[in-house]
Amino acid sequence: MSDSLFDAIRKNDESKVSELILSNPELVGSRDQRGSTPLLLSTYFGLKEITEILLKYPQDLDAQDASGNTALMGVCFKGFEEIAEKLIKAGANVNTRNYNGGTALIFAVSFGRTNLVRLLLENGADPGIKDDRGNTALDHARMHSVKDAIALLENYK
């Protein structure tokens, strides 16, 4: 049954996703072969409507895939600001670290997503967290020459 849910998400079939979860709400906590939850998959593909459906059900918003990445990290990598806002509003932890010590803020900085950097900082992201190599978000901003993020992080109080 969970394979059907993941297939429906990949096909962006909102009605099928709703039908499957309504018949078995525990499916929101299921995982595919890569360790992704339905929420991780829908956010990775930028599926706003399906993400909204999934967020109506209790679940671990900070569930991690096989690499330790969360839904919030994925949308910060991809640049899906509206979905990031929904995840944060729903209670996603902005400071969760993946298996390499990376955070959503480090992803947003590394990929030049300045609006997401601002959003994360406004919602409690800790710019002092270091990844496993000892680098903070500001270090990543400097390494990737993301001038707007450098300015935001240097002026962050």
Image (cartoon, helix red, strand yellow):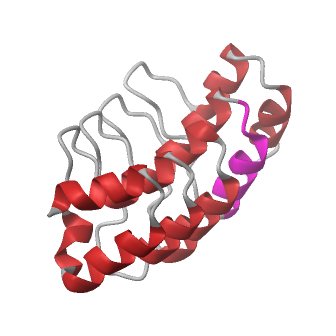
x and y percentages locating residue 98 in the rendered image? 35, 38
Outermost residue toward the left in this view? 1
How many numbered circles are shown?
A: 0
Q: Quadrant of residue 142?
A: top right
Q: Nearer the viewer, residue 124 or 98?
A: 98
Residue 104 inside the magenta-drawn segment: no
Q: Nearer the viewer, residue 81 or 126?
A: 81
Residue 115 inside the magenta-drawn segment: yes
Q: Quadrant of the N terminus?
A: bottom left
Q: Quadrant of residue 147?
A: top right
Q: Is residue 123 left or right of residue 104?
A: right
**Range of magenta residues:** 112-122
Q: Residue at x 31, y 52 (%)?
A: 7
Q: Is residue 126 left or right of residue 22?
A: right
Q: Main secondary structure of the magenta part?
A: helix
Q: Residue at x 58, y 63 (%)?
A: 48
Is residue 143 shown to the viewer in this render? yes
The answer to whether residue 82 is above or below residue 150 is below
Q: Residue at x 77, y 35 (%)?
A: 149
x and y percentages locating residue 127 in the rendered image? 60, 43
Q: Residue at x 56, y 69 (%)?
A: 49
The answer to whether residue 99 is above or below residue 116 is above
x and y percentages locating residue 90 in the rendered image? 49, 75
Q: Nearer the viewer, residue 78 or 142?
A: 78
Is residue 157 shown to the viewer in this render? no
